[in-house]
Amino acid sequence: MTDRSAPAPAPALGPASTSQPLPEPVVGPPVPGPPVPGQLTFQAPRRGKPPRHLADLAPAERTEAVQALGHKGFRAKQLSTHYFERLVESPAEMTDLPKTIRDDLVRDLLPPLLTPVVQRLADDGRTIKSVWRLHDGAIVESVLMRYPHRVTICVSSQAGCGMNCPFCATGQAGLTRNMSAGEIVEQVVSAARLLRRGELAGEGSSDEAASPLRVSNVVFMGMGEALANYKAAIGAIRRLTDPAPDGLGMSARGIVMSTVGLVPGIDKLATEGIPVTLALSLHAPDDELRNELVPINTRWSVDEALDAAYRYYEVTGRRVSIEYALIKDINDQAWRAELLGRKLTSRGRGWVHVNPIPLNPTPGSKWTASRPGVEQQFVERLRAAGIPTTIRDTRGQDIDGACGQLAASTA
């Protein structure tokens, strides 16, 4: 680590940079064990494809798939209604499907994608971390959280992660494989079923808004870099936002796409016409430090990532979130808060919100969260620059379910 005690010269704030193509992926067979420091993996190791699922397909594709199986096309709408709207778990409940074809349709279009391994509770039962085994043995995690007036699920988009951030347990494990759109959606559907069964603490209010029974928010902040698995992530978002019964009918404004700064992916996401919130995991305002904390910065610098985030705001009108893990004596200096404030305000006002996050501990990590007084000073410097800033609530830390802790542990 380089010296953090004195401010580095603030880099010039130039015009928006032009995004570049994705860099060449790491080539060759996957190497057992964790990645070497700084290694980036864009191409997931090849493994057997997950079985095709209804949630992988757009509505028209479902009709074609049902017809290809020799059944009438309207059966696709019936299957979609059972899966997305009624949250049916047992084929026996699909009584509008003739028994003679029900098993055939379920086997081919509603195969099991996630097998529960372990479930851990925190926050008096208002947070549940689920560990899932995929068809090929890969392990992923999702975290369901109840807050006043909303229920949020943090979903995984990859088994592991190739971005190799040294303070993140997921990144240190390396990338196992990409997840399919169906596997991503199934995490949300499974959570909705859990809610319907009353297994998440906090139900019982007579006010549906205060104690919702459906998942209202989805954040792509679990395992993986979703923009590195772009096609599946966008497919999942479309299934989440398609009106029922074609999808779950969620509002795109309740969906957060988190990224470490894959600039071409950010620019492409802006053109999709889906007004999700973009969250940029920045963690340092200067390239020297961010190169170490977020290795993708060696491909796209701080300013290039911020320029892309601002372009996203210009195209979509959606305010961008900046995620910033506060690490004791590493990135929490007041001058870094001031530098971040200058960089953000130089691009305009009202386009961004900063979420400092006290670093969550991970096994063997040499880093810890900033001291409360330092954390507060960091926040005050940003607010003094006119940047809306909110310390992010940390949920599930005691069950290794908080940001940066997901490591596919079955213990």
Image (tube, rainbow, N blue to C red):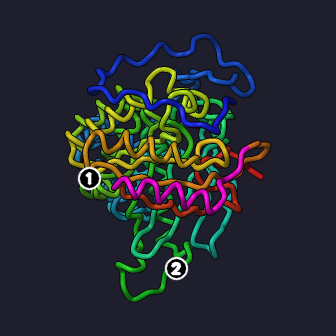
Which portion, as a residue range, is magenta? 367-386
Residue at 58%, 58% (x, y): give it.
375
In the rendered view of the protein, which quadrant contains the N terminus? top right
Q: Left or right: where does residue 292 sit relative to residue 105?
A: right
Residue 169 lies in quadrant? top right
Q: Determine the image quadrant of residue 69.
A: top left
One can see residue 364 in this view = yes
Q: Is residue 282 left or right of residue 385?
A: right
Q: Secondary structure at mark 2?
A: loop
Q: Nearer the viewer, residue 155 or 403?
A: 403
Q: Residues within 10 Å of mark 1 (few under 14, many from 20)?
A: some
Image coordinates for residue 372, horizontal then vertical, percent: 63, 62
Foreground pick, 54 / 141: 141
Q: Which numbered dot is residue 259? A: none
Q: For this rendering, which residue is in front, 137 or 121? A: 121
On the question of residue 77 being in view, the answer is no
Work out whether 213 lies above or below 193: below
Q: Name which residue type carries label 1.
A: Gly
Q: Is residue 248 left or right of residue 49?
A: left
In the rendering, at what x and y percent does residue 161 appear?
A: 58, 34
Residue at 44% from the left image edge and 87% from the top image edge? 205
**Amino acid type, label 2:** Gly
Question: Along the horizontal axis of the image, is 259 left or right of 132?
Answer: left
- Residue carrying label 1: 350
- Name the disc covering residue 202, or none: 2
Say which of marks 2 and 1 sits in front. Answer: 1
Crowding at mark 2 (Cα within 10 Å: few <14, some 14-19, many 20+): some
